[in-house]
Every structure is written in C-alpha cells, then in structure tokens.
Image (cartoon, rainbow, N blue to C red):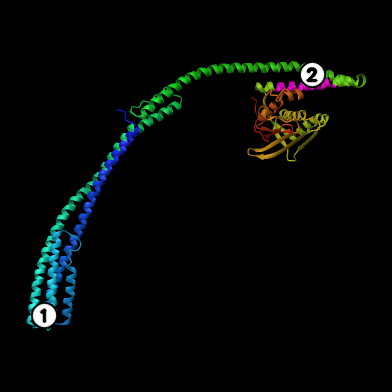
Amino acid sequence: MRVSINKKLLGTFVAGTLFAMTLLVWSLFTVEGLISTLQEIGDLTRLVDRSADLNLRIQRLIKAMGDYLLAGDTAKREEVEVLLSGISETARLSEGGVDGEVEAFGRSVADGVRRLEAAASALLAADEPAGSREAARLASEAAALGEELMAEVEEFNLSVSAQRKRLMDEASASAGGTRIILYAFPPVGVFLLFMVFLYLRYYVSRPLTELYKGAERISNGDFSYRVFIRTGDELQDLAGAFNRMAAALREREAKLVSMLKVVDKMNQELIATSRYKADFLANISHELKTPLTHILGFSDLLMLKAGSEFSEDNRRYVDNIHRSGETLLRLIDDMLRVSRVATGGIVVDLKELDVRDAVNSVARAVRAEAEEKRLSFIFEVDEGVGTVRADREMFRQMLVNLLDNAVKYTPEGGSVELRVWQEKADRGEELRVRVRDTGVGIRPELRGSVFELFEQGDKGTTRRFGGMGMGLALVKRFVEFHGGRIWFDSEEGKGSVFEFSIPVNMQAACSGV
C-alpha cells in the first residue's frame, strides 16, 4: 500500500505524541499521589508531636496543682494558669485535616481538656487551698480527669500513628512508581527516539542522500548513474523522475557531442576561409601599393615642373592626383594593418615613448589639413605628461585616426580639440587622450557599431566624406593591445568626443589576436 511521506511523518508525530502524553499523565498522577500522601504523613506527624506535648503538659499540670494545694502561694497559682492556657492551645488536635476517625478522637480530647480546665479553675477559685478538704477534693477530681485525659490522648496517639503507618506504606508504593518514572522512562525514551531515527533514516534521510549522490555524479558528467529508492512515496517518484532526467541528459549529451564535431569542422573551415581572405587582402594591398607608389612619385615630379610649364588647371589636376594617391595609400596601409590583426600578425613593441614629442609630430601633420578646411585646431599637453611604455607606431596611428576622423567629419568653420594628460586610477597611473570636434556627430542607432571593422555608419555620410570603416576599429584594437580602453560621447549635429586611456607603465609586450 502506498503511503505518502507526509502521512509517514504525520503518523510518526502522532504516535510519538500519544505515547509521550500517556507517560506524562501517568507520571503526573503518580507524583501527585506521592506528594499528597507525604503531606498527609506530615500532618499526622505534627498531630503525634502535639499529642505527646499535651500529655507532658497534663502531667506537669497535675503536679503543679498538687504543689499549689500544699503551698497555696501565688507563684504556684500562676504556673497552673500558664499550664492550663498551654493545654487549651495544644488540645486543638483536629486542625490540619485528617480522616473522620482522627477528628472524632480530637473532639473527645477537646471535651476532656474542657472538663480538666473547669476542675482546675474551681481549684484556683477556692480560698486558702492549703489544708482545705474542699480544695483537696477538687485537686483529686482534677487529677482523675487528667489521668483519664492522658489515657484518651494516648489512645488518640496510637490511632494517629496507625494511620501514619498506613500512609507511609502507600507512600512507599508510590515511591516505587516514581523510581520507575525516573529510572525506566529515560531509557525507554531514548529507545523510542532511536526507533524514530531509524524509521526516518530509512524512509527520508537515506533516500535524500541517494538523490544528493546522484545529483553530484550527474553534475560531474556521469549521466549513466541511476538512483534506486523503494519507499513507496514521493521520494520514490522523485527518484524515477531523476533517472528519467539523467537518461534525457545522456541522450542530449550524445547529440551535443555530434553537433560539436560538426561545429568544430565548420569553425576550422571558417578559420581557413578567414585566413585565405586575409592573405588575399594582404597580397592585393601589396600589389596595389607598388603602382600607387609610382603614381605618387610621378605626381611629385609633375608638381616640380608645374610652376613653369603647367597652367593653373593642370597644377590643380596634379595636386588632386597626389592627394588622392596619398588617401589611397593610407587606405591600403589600414587594410594591411587589418589583415595583420585578423591573422595575429601584430606584435606590440613596448618602448619608452616621449608623449609630448609624439603628439606634437601628429598635431603638426593634422594642422595643415585643418587649416585647409578653415577649422580651429587646438591641442594641449599637460605639464605632468612625460613618457609612457607604448608601441610608437600604434600610438601615433591611434592619434592620427582619431584626428583624421575629427577633421574629416567637421564642416568648415568648426573646431577640433586634442588634449592629453595623466591621472591616477585604480590600476595605477594612466595616460588619457581626448579628441573633441564640432562635426556631424553619430546617430543613436549607429553608436553600437562604431568600433566594428568595415562599419561605415550612415551611408549618406559615408558617400559624402568617404572612408572604409577601419580607422576607429583599429584604434580600439590598438588601445586594447596596450591594456587600455576607449569610449565616446556624441550628439547628432553637435559633434563627438572620443577618449581613451592606457597604463603609463606596461610590464610586458602584448601580442595581437
């Protein structure tokens, strides 16, 4: 029969609670009976003590009355009065609550004490008791009453002692039950707790441990492991679901392995294709660079003769040929750099670089282009800027690409600003470079692809200003080769700010990807 784990736990709790309540009630009754019996024994013991005290006082009273009869002085009279008062107080034997038989004896003793008090009072009321027959008769009568009362008190004492003995036997029997509670209950409780522990261990703890071991094995990649639990409850169902999950994971692992083999093969083919493309691009670039160099050389020769032999239009045509050739040469150089980056052919050669000299050199080259477009060009190198460990050519190319972009995309009458400074950062001293322009800016939807290769942004802007989308991508990779980072901020129609930082002291050269 299937029993759910909730019912098992509830049944264990109910059975344990009922057993504990039964033992608790029996213990309470046993202990309460023992306490009640001991209280009654204490009451009876006090009655025995008071009855013995009463007998002693009666004996002293009989002797004191005899002395008073003989002497008749005031001191003996006061002694008799004190003894009478004490006997009256002690005679209240029925106080304290005992059974009816003891109360009857108490009332009888109280009556005898009242008669004795009356006789003694009559003796005290007699004039000149010494030698008086009436006083002697009263004394004799009081002594007889005292003897009778002492006999009754003795009988009362025996009755109380018998009842006390019976209660002590009952207390002894209750004490035996209490010993059972004290000595037997702890072992029984420990045994029952152990049985509950075994029950829960078999039906709860052990299955959970098995499930944990299974989860551990599967997390380590052993999908063939199976959990076997036979508890007839939800844990058994959980084990079944666990085994089905392991089988499904094993099947998916096999499929994944086969898919990974296919993906790996495709990846190898893509790597080979990418290498072929890079090699092709490098070869084409080299092949283009040779005739382009000739074109630039011949255009330089033509420029030398332009002053004497060429008209103004011809000089302008030659100048356009030379400028277009330089632009094409820069594009080819960028393509060569891209091909080296793609094939892992770039090695960062870190050397001590004078930042101020490098910035001045680039700024002088850019200033001519800026002035030709009638742009305001400002560059500033802070006093604290010194040397930095960097690749000289890469650092120069980072500045050139950022400034060329700023000049290219800034309309006539605008401004371009370059600022270089050093500051402390979490990872140490950093060199910071910022290029700000008042150009066309970058549309928000194009900002995510600014640093990607061959991404030219807005097609209309590209047709207007030219470019192949390699400059910023190369800058980002060169900055990262130096362990730095680059970011920008731009607003369409208001210009852009590009900024990068590199550590001042790089520890070792980094190779490109």
Read off the magenta span.
319-337
Would you say residue 477 is visible in this rendering? no
Tag 1 secondary structure: helix
Mark 1: few, some, or many residues within 10 Å (few <14, many ≥20)? Answer: many
The residue that label 1 is drawn on is 69
Q: Amino acid at mark 1?
A: Leu
State the image quarter where residue 17 is shown.
top left
Left or right: 288 as drawn, with respect to 513: right
Left or right: 74 as drawn, with respect to 404: left
Magenta run includes residue 95: no
The residue that label 2 is drawn on is 293
Q: Nearer the viewer, residue 383 or 118?
A: 118
Would you say residue 245 is visible in this rendering? yes
Look at 76% across and 18% down and name the residue there.
289
- Disc nearer the start of the sequence (2/1): 1
Q: Amino acid at mark 2?
A: Thr
Mark 2: few, some, or many residues within 10 Å (few <14, many ≥20)? Answer: some
Look at 32% across and 32% down and name the residue there.
202
Magenta run includes residue 330: yes
Tag 2 secondary structure: helix
User: Above or below — where is 123 with respect to 467?
Assistant: below
Question: How many numbered marks appear?
Answer: 2
State the image quarter where residue 267 is shown.
top right
Image location of residue 348, percent across then percent down:
68, 27
